[in-house]
């Protein structure tokens, strides 16, 4: 089963996850938000499975730099997806998908079980 790691190449969390998978010899496909964009259907699946409060990174510099009106507009899953599509750096990284398993962030135990 194919593993896809979604993120931004220069993100430290993405680098940690990639290093862990590489060290274990786990094959995966890397999806770069900057070059390939954010797959909207996948984003909906992640938000549905994990919740917008898990997938949306409200602690990062990108979120803090957003206009208050944009932040206040996030009131449901659809509005959260809209903001994340427009600002991919507001998506928590990495997101690793293998079949129906979705790992958000650097969860070592979950990544080791892939």
Image (cartoon, helix red, strand yellow):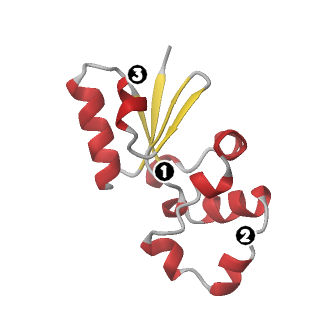
Residue farthest along the top direction in this orientation = 1
Identify whether 40 is placed above or below 75: above
Is the C terminus in the top left, top right, bottom left or bottom right quadrant?
Answer: top left
Is residue 93 found left or right of 112 in the rendered image?
Answer: right
Residue 68 x/y as whole percent: 64, 86
Residue under circle 3?
A: 113
Residue drawn at point x = 34 percent, y = 46 percent: 14
Pointer 1 local density, CA inside 10 Å: few below 14, some 14–19, many at least 20: some
Sequence-wise first label, 2 or 1: 1
Residue 29 x/y as whole percent: 41, 29
Choose top left, top right, bottom left or bottom right for residue 108: top left
Closer to us: 70 or 35 = 70
Sequence-wise first label, 3 or 1: 1
Q: Secondary structure at mark 3?
A: loop
Q: Nearer the viewer, mark 2 or mark 1?
A: 2
Pointer 2 local density, CA inside 10 Å: few below 14, some 14–19, many at least 20: some
Q: CA distance from mark 3 to mark 1?
A: 25 Å
Residue under circle 2?
A: 74
Q: CA distance from mark 2 to mark 1?
A: 21 Å
Residue under circle 1?
A: 33
Pointer 3 local density, CA inside 10 Å: few below 14, some 14–19, many at least 20: few
The numbered dot on residue 104 is none
Residue 56 x/y as whole percent: 58, 59
């Amino acid at each position: 089963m194919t593993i896809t790691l979604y993120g931004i190449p220069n993100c430290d969390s993405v680098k940690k996850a990639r290093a862990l998978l590489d060290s274990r010899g786990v094959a995966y496909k890397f999806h770069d938000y900057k070059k390939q964009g954010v797959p909207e259907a996948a984003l909906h699946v992640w938000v549905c499975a994990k919740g917008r409060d898990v997938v949306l990174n409200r602690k990062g510099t990108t979120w803090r730099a957003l206009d208050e009106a944009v932040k206040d507009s996030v009131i449901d899953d659809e509005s959260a997806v809209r903001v994340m599509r427009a600002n991919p750096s507001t998506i928590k990284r990495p997101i690793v998908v293998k079949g129906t398993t979705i790992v958000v962030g650097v969860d070592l135990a979950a990544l080791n079980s892939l």
